[in-house]
Image: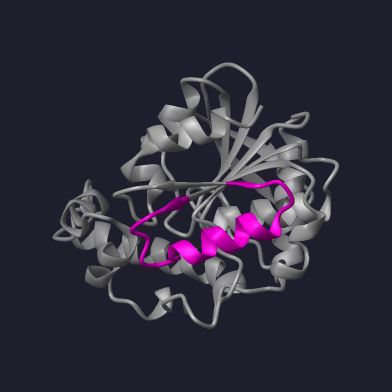
Amino acid sequence: MQTRTVETRRAPVRCLEGGSGPPLVYLHGAMGTAPGDPVLGALASRWHVFAPYLPGYGDTETCGELRDMLDFTLHTADVVDALGLDDPILVGHSMGGMIAAEMAAIAPHDVSRLALIAPLGLWLDDHPIPDVFSLLPYEMPAYLFHAPEAGAKQMASGLDMDDPEFLKAFLIRNARQMGMAGKILFPIPERGLAERLYRIKARTVVVQGQSDRLVPPPYGEAFAAAIPGARLVVVPEVGHMVAAEKPGAVVEAVAGLR
């Protein structure tokens, strides 16, 4: 994946880009993304992938002007416009799925194909979502992965916590990212999206991990039921990090949006 910068009204945005074929925009979750993200490589085998870093992630600076869900939604739509894309497939994971769903609901005629992977954005009282901001790092894999031990190794890959300079940079980066995510996810990841999902006109697939302990399966069912004509794909033996554990399943689901 190559990296480019696009200018928007509010701030410059760094974007990963790679592959060939029809355009596809991938919006990452609160854990962020990177050039070696398995799902980006898998998607790039079939589409021309654009994966912008949300404010505060990667080399994209934070933007204090973005204060609420509407700000983030319109900013991301501005990024798509700045990339010069005409009706790309819109794919979002977790927090990115929340933003993608908002984009498709606010401008239903601008998005014709939508893939939501373990999306946040709804709240079910019978299935409360854990407070990710209160979890310690060692607790996260159990919520994110079907196989927590393998997930922990994947999360720790390339991290040298014994290096004081690396640790300082890591903590600063993590605080910056969580600060951004908190604007739309804290105290709970619910900003009224349930009242707007009916407006989505895009052909939609919702991909849900059967073992997701962060956003459990009833949320995938709720999204699919609320979006007209949406199709639900439940992937067995996979947790919230569907795109990391089984990127092929994501490719297959997106390919079904014809």
Residue drawn at 67 percent across, 68 percent down = 64
Q: Dividing the picture into quarters, in which one does residue 240 lie?
A: bottom left
Give the answer, above or below, for where 62 lies relative to 13. Answer: below
The magenta stretch spans residue 155: no
Q: Which image quarter is the C terminus in?
A: top right
Give the answer, above or below, for where 212 lies relative to 189. Answer: above
Left or right: 133 in relation to 20: left
Left or right: 155 in relation to 39: left
Number of numbered discs overlaid on the protein picture: 0
Compare residues 124 and 9 and report the one nearer the observer.
124
Give the answer, above or below, for where 193 lies relative to 15. Answer: below
Q: Dividing the picture into quarters, in which one does residue 110 lie?
A: top right
Q: Dividing the picture into quarters, in which one does residue 180 lie?
A: bottom right
The answer to whether residue 10 shows anywhere in this view is no
Q: Residue 242 in the image: x percent, y percent?
A: 39, 48
Residue drawn at 76 percent across, 69 percent down = 195
Residue drawn at 27 percent across, 55 percent down = 146
Residue drawn at 60 percent across, 72 percent down = 183
Q: Residue 120 in the image: x percent, y percent?
A: 55, 63
The magenta stretch spans residue 220: yes
Left or right: 6 in relation to 144: right
Q: Residue 234 in the image: x percent, y percent?
A: 44, 49
The outermost residue toward the top is 20
Q: Residue 222 in the image: x percent, y percent?
A: 59, 63
Range of magenta residues: 208-231
